[in-house]
Image (cartoon, rainbow, N blue to C red):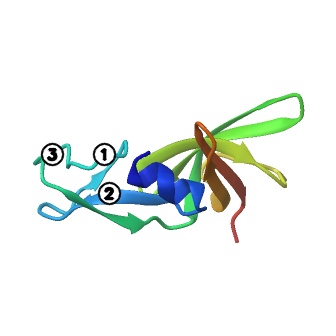
Amino acid sequence: MNKFEQELRNGNFVCGECSKCNKLVWPPSDLCNNCFNNVKWRPISKIAKLVEFSSKNDEYFCIAEFENQIRVMGKVENILNLHVGQTLTLVKCGFDGKEIFVFGLGD
């Protein structure tokens, strides 16, 4: 299990940031995909922007964007008038064989 998965399992959403060029590395990797230097892992903001959403069987799913570059798929809870561009808050993350992201409406 890699550092990203370990942190998710503990409820922490982290991303690698290159220690040389300061680029956020996504998808997660131990090496920068720009200069191949090692990364340091840092927490990601819990505030995201709703990029897209869909529903099935009364469940809502979305693509959310963090820090203007990291996009993940997740589930949206407590939905009320969802619209693209809306602020979401990451309320839960985890790892159970796959990444788990759950969002609520932002402030």
**Residue 83 seen in this snapshot:** yes
- List x then y, in percent, for residue 19: 17, 65
- How far apart are the alpha carbons under marks 1 and 2? 7 Å
Name the one closer to the observer, 102 or 8: 8
User: Residue at the location (46% across, 64% down)?
Assistant: 44
Q: Are marks 1 and 2 in contact (CB under 8 Å)?
A: yes
- List x then y, in percent, for residue 36: 12, 47
Q: Label 2 crowding class (10 Å Cα cut-off): few <14, some 14-19, many 20+?
A: many
- Which amino acid, mark 1? Ser
Nearer-N-terminus badge (1/2)? 2
Q: Secondary structure under badge 3?
A: loop
Q: In which quarter of the image is residue 9?
A: bottom right
Name the one closer to the observer, 6 or 27: 6
Mark 2, residue position? 16
- In the visual, does 12 lie left or right of 40? right
Mark 3, residue position? 34
- In the visual, does 79 lie left or right of 12? right
**Residue 86 seen in this snapshot:** no
- Which amino acid, mark 2? Gly
User: Residue at the location (58% across, 37% down)?
Assistant: 98
Viewer-nearest of labels 3 and 2?
2
- List x then y, in percent, for residue 16: 32, 57
- Which amino acid, mark 3? Asn
- How far apart are the alpha carbons under marks 3 and 1? 11 Å
Mark 1, residue position? 29
Nearer-N-terminus badge (3/2)? 2
